[in-house]
Image (cartoon, rainbow, N blue to C red):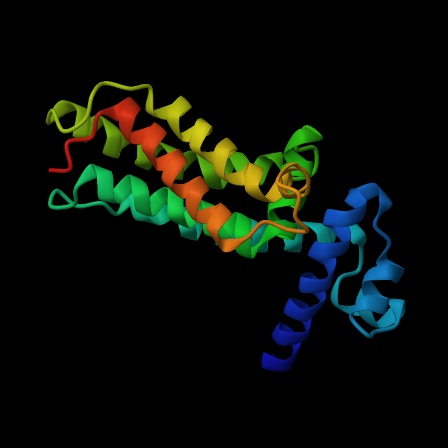
Amino acid sequence: MLNRDRLEADIAAVAVRVFAECGYEGASVAAIAEGAGLSKQNLMYYFPTKQELYRRVLDDVLDDWLERMSSLAQATEDDAPADVLRAYVQAKLRFSQEQPYASRVYAMEVIGGARLYGGQIQERVVPVLKRDIDVFERWIAAGRIAPVNATHLLFAIWAMTQSYADFAAQMALVLDRRQLLKKDYQEAEDTIVGLVLALVQAHGT
């Protein structure tokens, strides 16, 4: 079982790149199999259809994405809002930096109307979002931050951080370099955190 799990993970790692580069419609099982060093027939033993493999890729993406969102919902009364929000932005930017293909596959599915994965997004993302909003509401009730629309603030954070994966090529072109550098992500973090904290007027208590 361990060998099977590892092989399936290796196949998914190749598939995420192919889906990111070609989209769902343009990706072929044969290309993924070749990249994984398998025959198409062997790959289809583990993933009988392209849609099943695509869903596995998106499951892995969402697992990682939600794990990096967990710091906000886990905030305690002793945690300063400013520190919690900075950690949240850091985690989202790290996802964009470390998993650009994963970010792009997820974004392409959503942009396309989430036709193949909408149910899972509703089932898994909505409860996490509600828990995060509860944290903001507790902070607001305690006077620790200014009243804000937490839902749209979180949407804005997602958009700002994910753009550093989905539009990294454009950013690099504008900055006249081959790819974004570590300092670009640090400057992005400082800028996004500054905007967020200015909005919520976090007191750091």
Q: Is residue 154 above or below residue 59?
A: above
Can residue 119 be spotted in the picture? yes
Report the front residue among 83 and 140.
83
> In the visual, does 198 lie left or right of 192?
left
Residue positioned 42% across, 52% down in the render: 67
Where 204 sits versus 5, above or below? above
Q: Is residue 18 left or right of residue 205?
A: right
Image x and y of residue 168, in percent: 63, 43
Count of all numbered marks drawn on residues in the image: 0
Residue shown at 35%/32% (left/top)?
A: 130
Horizontal side of residue 203 vs 159, given as left or right: left
Q: Is residue 65 visible?
A: no
**Residue 90 placement (x, y as % from top left):** 39, 48
**Residue 4 sits in which quadrant?**
bottom right
Residue 170 quadrant: top right
Residue 44, relative to residue 89: is it above or below? below
Q: Is 172 on the left-hand or right-hand side of 131?
A: right
Q: Residue at x 65, y 36 (%)?
A: 174
User: In the rendering, at what x and y percent does residue 43 appear?
Assistant: 81, 68
What residue appears at the point 78 percent right and 43 percent down from the top-left corner? 23
Image quadrant holding the N terminus, namely bottom right
Give 27 or 90, whichever is nearer the viewer: 90
The quarter in which the C terminus is drawn is top left
Give the image location of residue 184, x and y in percent.
Answer: 50, 46
